[in-house]
C-alpha cells in the first residue's frame, strides 16, 4: 500500500527536494507503459485557463532535466526534449510513502522514485 495523500502544494514542496537527483518515472497510461530516467534539474506547474476542450489538461507538471527513455525493445534512447510533462486534473491524487511518489490521474498512473 502507498503512503499518505498529499495536497499539490505539499507534493511540490517534497518533490522540489529531489532537484539534482536522478529519478525514474514509470507511466502507465491506457495500454502504454513507459520508463524514463532523468537527472531532475527543475520542476514547475502550468495552469491552462484557455483550454479548447476537456481533453487538454487544466494543469501540467513539467519535470526538467536530461535523461533517457526505455523503448519497447528495452533499449535506452535520449529523451526527445529536456522537459517531461505530466497532465494533471482537479481530481489528481498525490501520494508519498517516503520513498516514492504516486500520481493517479484520469489518464493513468505515474510513479516517481529516486534511482
Image (tube, rainbow, N blue to C red):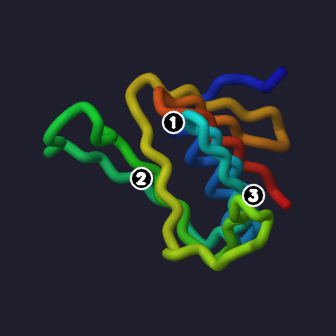
Between 38 and 17, the one nearer to me in the picture = 38
Left or right, residue 30 beside residue 19? left
Residue 56 at x, y = what percent? 28, 41
Residue 53 at x, y = what percent? 18, 35
Q: Which mark is residue 65?
A: none
Left or right, residue 59 beside residue 93? left
Quarter of the image for the N terminus: give it: top right
Q: Which mark is residue 45?
A: 2
Work out whether mark 2 precedes mark 1 in sequence or the reverse, and give the earlier one.
1
The number of numbered badges drawn on the structure is: 3
Element class at badge 2: strand
Residue, disc 3: 24
Work out whether mark 3 precedes mark 2 in sequence or the reverse, and give the earlier one.
3
Of the residues tagged 3 and 2, which is closer to the observer?
3
Q: CA distance from mark 3 to mark 1?
A: 20 Å
Of the residues tagged 3 and 1, which is closer to the observer?
3
Residue 106 at x, y = what percent? 47, 27
Work out whether mark 3 precedes mark 1 in sequence or the reverse, and give the earlier one.
1
Please tell me how crowded label 1 is: few (under 14), some (14-19), or many (20+) other residues with Cα within 10 Å.
some
- Image position of 37 with respect to 48: above or below: below
Element class at badge 3: strand
Residue, disc 1: 8
Amino acid at each position: 500500500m502507498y503512503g499518505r495523500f498529499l495536497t499539490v502544494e505539499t507534493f511540490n514542496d517534497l518533490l522540489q527536494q529531489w532537484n539534482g537527483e536522478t529519478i525514474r518515472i514509470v507511466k502507465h497510461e491506457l495500454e502504454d507503459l513507459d520508463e524514463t530516467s532523468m537527472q531532475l534539474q527543475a520542476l514547475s506547474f502550468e495552469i491552462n485557463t484557455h483550454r479548447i476542450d476537456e481533453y487538454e489538461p487544466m494543469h501540467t507538471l513539467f519535470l526538467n532535466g536530461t535523461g533517457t527513455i526505455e523503448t519497447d525493445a528495452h533499449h535506452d534512447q535520449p529523451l526527445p526534449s529536456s522537459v517531461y510533462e505530466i497532465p494533471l486534473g482537479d481530481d489528481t491524487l498525490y501520494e508519498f510513502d517516503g520513498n516514492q511518489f504516486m500520481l493517479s490521474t484520469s489518464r493513468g498512473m505515474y510513479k516517481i522514485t529516486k534511482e
